[in-house]
Amino acid sequence: MAERILSAKGPATESAGWIRPTGRQLLGEGEVHVWRVSLDQAAPTIRQLYGLLSEDERARAGEYAFARDRERFTVLRSALRMILGEYTGIKSRDIPLRYGQKGKPFIWRRKGLAPMHFNASHSAGLGLVAVARGHRVGVDLEAVRASFEWMTIAGRFFSARECECISSLPASDQADVFSALWTRKEACLKAAGLGLAGGLEQVEVATDPQESPKLLRAPIEMLPLSRWELIDLEPGEGFRGCLVVEGPCLERKQWIWSYPPSLAG
Ligand SMILES: CC(C)(COP(=O)(O)OP(=O)(O)OC[C@H]1O[C@@H](n2cnc3c(N)ncnc32)[C@H](O)[C@@H]1OP(=O)(O)O)[C@@H](O)C(=O)NCCC(=O)NCCS
């Protein structure tokens, strides 16, 4: 039943559509770029990356109880700053990040700076950053946890149809498809800036393997539903991901983020 959802397995190699870019990337209208970021970096690199964070980001990093979480936050946030810096021409540490009512970060628009939208997600040692010009985007990434009691969570946040899609599968595939559906739902809420406060249970996505992923039900702020395009990503073996774009995504490029040689540890 869920062949299409299952078929998104596989390693995020260059052959799976993730490419190491050469030179600076240009982002056209209607285009979306997704960057894949490895979050586990060497200590000297992390120390340098920490220098790119703003005061409030450093304070936030300091709130993490575990060093690994603090380091991964530092790596993803600094990569986000560098990626945005590449497109805007603004120095990474000067990117004017602000936050929406529900916490979605955005670039404070300066005169002469074309509107740019972005969103980020992380899970285990991997991060994704989606960037678009003129269209809101949401991205979500989840590491699939094999021995995971998905039923309890799905019962609370998934529709009857979504639960049925998972439970009709062999037990060995259920956690994987749960994660695929979860990322679709969460990426929708993130695209609209609602975050989880928007209510995962208010979002329903298509589960038919013959259909492209699409939104069937969403909070009122997201209507009309037809304006959101859902794209399943293949972030890497053991991960599920989804990108949601407001308006048609005319072209998608998937890049592997590498640190400038001066930072690579
Ligand atoms: C942000 C949120 C969606 C996190 O989901 P998650 O699966 O734990 O984490 P992800 O890695 O997928 O996404 C986190 C990133 O999403 C972005 N983000 C934060 N709030 C967001 C929002 N409302 N909408 C879209 N993106 C958001 C940030 O870049 C964040 O990265 P950071 O944690 O490094 O700052 C969820 O925790 C949330 O909705 N938080 C908002 C706070 C909240 O619910 N408050 C309740 C009262 S309003």
Image (spheres, grey):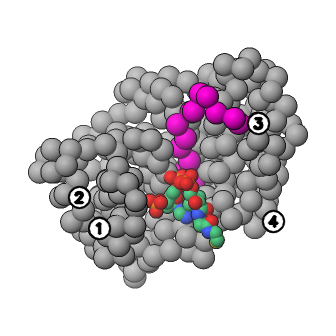
Label 1 beta carbon less than 8 Å to ligand 1: no
Q: Which residue is mark 2?
A: 49
Q: Nearer the viewer, mark 3 or mark 2?
A: 3
The dot on residue 220 is 4
Q: Nearer the viewer, mark 3 or mark 1?
A: 3
The dot on residue 53 is 1
The dot on residue 186 is none
Left or right, 139 with reference to 69 = right
Q: Amino acid at mark 2?
A: Leu
For numbered disc 4, what is the local secondary structure? helix
User: Is the C-beta separation of discs 4 and 2 under 8 Å?
Assistant: no
Q: Which residue is mark 3?
A: 151
Examine the rendered structure and indicate whether residue 148 appears above or below residue 173: below
Q: Which residues are magenta?
A: 133-151
Left or right, 112 with reference to 199 = left
Q: Quadrant of ligand 1?
A: bottom right
Quadrant of the drawing holding the N terminus:
top right
Q: Nearer the viewer, mark 4 or mark 3?
A: 3
Question: Would you identify the image quadrant in which residue 207 lies?
Answer: top right
User: Is the C-beta separation of discs 1 and 2 under 8 Å?
Assistant: yes
Sequence order check, earlier mark of 4 and 1:
1
